[in-house]
Image (cartoon, rainbow, N blue to C red):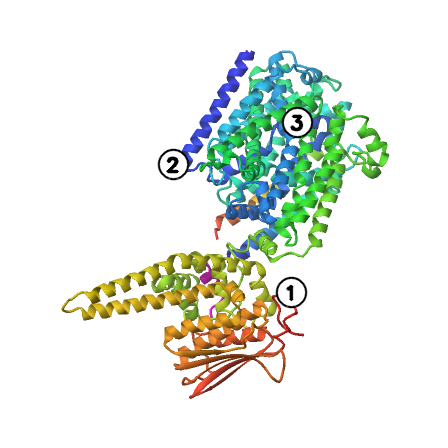
Amino acid sequence: MGKRRDDRLSSRLVAVTVLGFLLLGPPILSLFDHGGLVLGVPLVWVYVFLAWAAVIGVVAALTSRAGRRPG
Amino acid sequence: MLGDTFVTVVAGVYLVLLFVVAYYGDRRARAGRSVIANGTVYSLSLAVYATSWTYYGGVGQAATSGLGFLPVYLGPTLMFALGWVVLRKIVRISRKHRITSLADFISARYGSSTRLGGLVTVLTVVGLLPFIALQLKTVSNSCEIIRLHPRVPTKWELAHVPFVQDTGLYLTFMLAAFAIWFGARHLDASERHEGMVVTIAFESVVKLVIFLIAGFYVVYGMFGGFGDLFELAAATPRTATTLAIDTGQGYGTWVWLTVLSMLAVILLPRQWQMTFVENTDERHLLRAMWMFPLYLLVINLFVLPIALGGLLRFGSGSAVDPDTFLLALPLAQGQELVTLLVFVGGLSTATGMIIVETVALSTMISNYLVMPLLLRSRSRLVEKDDLTGVILGVRRASIIVIMAAGYAYFRVFGGGVALVSFGLLSFVAVAQFAPSVFGGLFWRNGTRRGALAGLSAGFTAWIYTLLLPTFDKAGWLPGSLTEDGLFGQEWLRPQALFGMTGMDEISHAMFWSMLVNIGGYVAFSLAERLPPAALADAAVFVDALDDGGGARRWYGRITVADLRSLVERFLGSAGAARAFRDHLAEDHLGSSPEAEADPELIQYVESLLVGAVGPACARFVIASVTREDPMPAETIREILDEASQVAALEERHRLARELHDSVSQALFSMNLHTRALELAVQREDWERKEPVVLTLAELRELTQSALSEMRALIFQLRPGTLHEEGLVNAARRHLATVAAREGITISVEAPEERLTLTERAEQDLFRVIQEAAHNSIKHAGPAQISVRLHEDVLKPGTLVVEVSDNGIGFDPGIPHPGHLGLDGMRERTERLGGRLDIESSPSGSTVRAVIPGLLRPADVRHEDVGTAVPE
């Protein structure tokens, strides 16, 4: 039934949220936060945007799959 | 090129364009081809989150604290990742209960309290003023910068614009007119504004595109790309510090801001309006969950580079306000086209935010503050039949008042304060609603008193730790509150309460306000026992996602044939046949009528019945036909939990009332008319009038019996009357109608004085008597039935209920297909702690329920109505 799939989607999204909270906060954040430049750009700046984009990407993948199979 | 007049013309043209867009959206909506019925427009409309704060203030913040501006956009990303779990629930509740604002939501969750709704409204208005002031400040600043160009004005100049010269003042009133046109032109029951949503989505595109253009210009036009800009910044001591997050104060602020913005992104009135009220389909959330965060990511890409560009260009000790870098950079370079675009983009962010925010606030003000007062005072204004004019007037007036107050706030307090600190002040204010809203969504035991206590405490803390210090800074308070504390008490300093230092003011305020808010909410909620009505309210919110797509599962046992005959009663045989054929074909189930129906089929039947009789009735019907299953007690309790019982009872009362008012009355007058016709015909002198007279007599009898059947039915639907009348009287009345209908004798023998029984016991026993009489008439064809109720002489307190007949008897051991009476009677008796005996012989049968300990002395009051089981 739709219900079961819905539950699975919800649980995965909760997991993604927790992961996002961990990736985008201390102490993981502090690993990249020493003010240095990598290839001319600040490491922490690149890291935050990449991790952020990754979270959005995973959410997009999960939800678009749910959107394709209505029910 | 950038003269005063030219800029005014450009701004005017832009605003006219917005009207055109809104008009187009409204027209498409009226034509039934809505523009907003897709996830992309929905996601873009949510981007009203990115206001002037993002557009100008983000750069300003980045210039002072580097990446510290980012948590405000990371929070929404995390909250929207939870969209399918949290936001969908609110969307569904709002849809189902016609909730049109945050105040509606909180009030509806806690017993439709106007007081609570009023409190929420007042707090929102007070909390949001700084935010509106922020927008007006940016509008005023940007106008001033354009006016003074090509010179770039200093921070001091911007903070001291003469009152009459301030273009912001005139724009404020223009924006108020704009908001009125968008949101308070006419009244709509759903409070949806398609034109407004289209406009906001359009503005979101405009501001994003322009911001990117400005970003590209700064990074590639003024510097040699990202690498060049960053390397230059890293080499300059003043800007090098902004390339790291932790500037010596740790990550506390970062985490607090993330949490704070997670809450604010749904609790800000404009976000609530866009996310929940203007949502047309919950599936749009699926796209918004990633597209809205993506929008925020893209718009923030250039914030840090622009801030660095500004610092490098104007020098670190510059008098230019970092909040205006976005405009000042191209202006200082003489790039007039980019400057103009940035100005239009800024106007776009401010107008979008102000329109939605004031519309949402004005709805709350009129619904929870002004209208209740007007209605209560019986003012002459509200004596008219049509209140539309009054309501619209109130809303328009409140929009103007809000705007004026926002402007005043900005003039009084806003001079030299950074944009971001205004915004965060409002963020913390709306975050105070979080415990009541999320507690209400996921916790059954939250109560109105808890919500009132939590909100009041949280807001008091907000006022003390955040708002008062801004008053203090403006020199409004005697003494120096921020420095020395209240009454000169060091430990009462608003920004270091109880000596708590080492946190920035926002984190500090969040900690204390959330502590007292959540504490008050939980403590007051746990202190009281919830009445069933409050539990029913809670269930509507907490279980919002359960009763739509995936309903509760039924574990009852019933055959497919029985289920089908049930559906036939509601949908007719043709409808039932079609429904069953469709369902069985779809799921490839075995279609043997004797097979036991699986939970999915039962659930499907429930959904069919919902269409016919509404959810509460459907649940009740299914619960009663599947009751013979030896379910665990918990499951029974869960199925018939108090919430659904309350709902079912209400539904039944309504049904009874309507049947009484419509069908009963019709039958009654049919009966009268038939009788009149009969008499008239009898007086006539026709040749062959006999058949007519006979048919008329038959017709009258039919209507008569239909009428009494209807009365019996109405009576059954109203279990409350049973308790008013008492079991014995109710049984007598019911049996008298049955006897009249069936043409048999039914005698009732019972003690004169009223039996002292709980309501539950009365109901169950009434059903047992009713069912036993019904059984006997249906299967044994008796001429006489006698019903006896008495106390067992040997065992005091034991009640014996006997229903016996002189019919042909039946075998109690053989199950009767399609008929669940005996088991139901047994279950009811056992629930009361008794047992059911059945004796049957060809000369008659007796059903006897013996329930020990049920009769108690009359002077004992039973508080536990629901349980009648003795120890």
Q: Are marks 2 and 1 on the same chain?
A: yes
Q: Under tag 3, what secondary structure?
A: helix
- The spot of residue B688 in percent (x, y) is 15, 69
Q: Looking at this view, is B287 or B91 the one in front? A: B91
- The spot of residue B701 in percent (x, y) is 31, 69
All told, the count of numbered labels is: 3
Identify the residue position indicated by label 3 in the image: B57
Which residue does the image show at 68% across and 29% down from the upper left? B422
Separation (CA) of disc 3 from disc 1? 61 Å
Q: Under tag 2, what secondary structure?
A: loop
Chain ID, mark 2 = B
Magenta residues, start to end: B596-607
Q: Under tag 1, what secondary structure?
A: loop
Q: Nearer the viewer, mark 2 or mark 1?
A: 1
- The disc placed on residue B863 is 1
- The spot of residue B73 in percent (x, y) is 64, 36
Q: Is residue B391 visible?
A: no
Q: Where B513 sits versus B633, above or below?
A: above
Q: Where B159 sits versus B91, above or below?
A: above
Task: Report the amino acid beneath label 2.
Answer: Ala
Q: Earlier in the sequence, mark 2 or mark 1?
A: 2
Magenta stretch contains residue B669:
no
Q: Nearer the viewer, mark 3 or mark 1?
A: 1
Task: Report the amino acid beneath label 3.
Answer: Gly
Which residue does the image show at 61% across and 35% down from the upper left? B297
Q: Looking at this view, is B739 or B274 the one in front? A: B739
Q: Looking at this view, is A35 or B271 the one in front? A: B271
For label 2, the crowd category at 10 Å Cα-Cα, with few meaning under 14, some 14 to 19 and many 20 or more, is: few
Identify the residue position indicated by label 2 in the image: B31
Side of B812 where B60 appears, left or right: right
Separation (CA) of disc 2 from disc 3? 40 Å
